Amino acid sequence: MASVGPILAIVSGCIMLLTFILYVVSNALPEWGVSESQSEKATIGLWRACISINGPTKCGNIISDCELYRGQAIQRCHKMIAARAFVTIACILSALSAVCIFTYIIIQTETNQILFMISKVLPILSFIAGIIGLAVGIAFITSSDSVKLSSATFVDIVAVAINVIGAILAVLVR
């Protein structure tokens, strides 16, 4: 690597690590969408939904079996499953890309071209999975008129934006 190369690789690895953390947070939070009225607030995530009626909040897992749904709910269920899958894939790929980038920095041998190429490709694949997961997740949440985007969606937007920066930096590493 050139003199700028190690610094660029370290920055790219740190960005991909941050991207991984943000993808995990957006995947785990039950707040991709929120619906509020005077006395109740309902939030929905990719895995859990919560409702608060005059105070205490109760949360539960969202049923993953789309065969239990009817009508338009089946399409919404399929969007939820796809969003879960792509955001989870983005989590895994961003973590693997950070590991590969840091491993490449530590090993620093010229014969390690496979790891070098993998550390360039994984951030791009993570970005693609993240953007698809974000788009399908937003489609899942906004399929109901009364639900507005919430914090986990915005965390995922930030994760995708940071992911693209990490992918660009990873490609620029020589």
Image: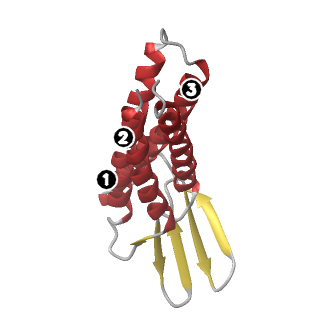
Indicate the amino acid at tag 2: Ile
Q: Nearer the viewer, mark 1 or mark 3?
A: 3
Indicate the amino acid at tag 3: Ile
Percent from the top left, x then y, of residue 24?
56, 48
Q: Nearer the viewer, mark 1 or mark 2?
A: 2
Counting residues from the start of the chain, the first of labels 1 and 2 encountered is: 1
Q: Residue at x 49, y 54 (%)?
A: 46
Percent from the top left, x then y, of residue 146?
37, 77
Counting residues from the start of the chain, the first of labels 3 and 2 encountered is: 3
Calculate the distance from the C-alpha at mark 1 to the C-alpha at mark 2: 35 Å
Q: Is residue 115 something one can see in this rendering?
A: yes
Q: Residue at x 44, y 58 (%)?
A: 158
Q: Is residue 137 above or below residue 107?
A: below
Checking the image for residue 105, the label placed there is 3
Q: Please name the residue that numbered disc 2 is placed on.
A: 168
Q: Residue at x 69, y 78 (%)?
A: 56
Checking the image for residue 75, the label placed there is 1
Q: Is residue 115 left or right of residue 59?
A: left
Q: Is residue 85 above or below residue 79?
A: above
Picture quarter with the C terminus: top left
Q: Residue 148 appears in which quarter of the rendering?
A: bottom left
Calculate the distance from the C-alpha at mark 1 to the C-alpha at mark 3: 45 Å
Q: Nearer the viewer, residue 94 or 3?
A: 3
Way the structure is coloured: secondary structure
Label 1 with label 3: CB-CB less than 8 Å: no
Percent from the top left, x then y, of residue 155?
49, 60
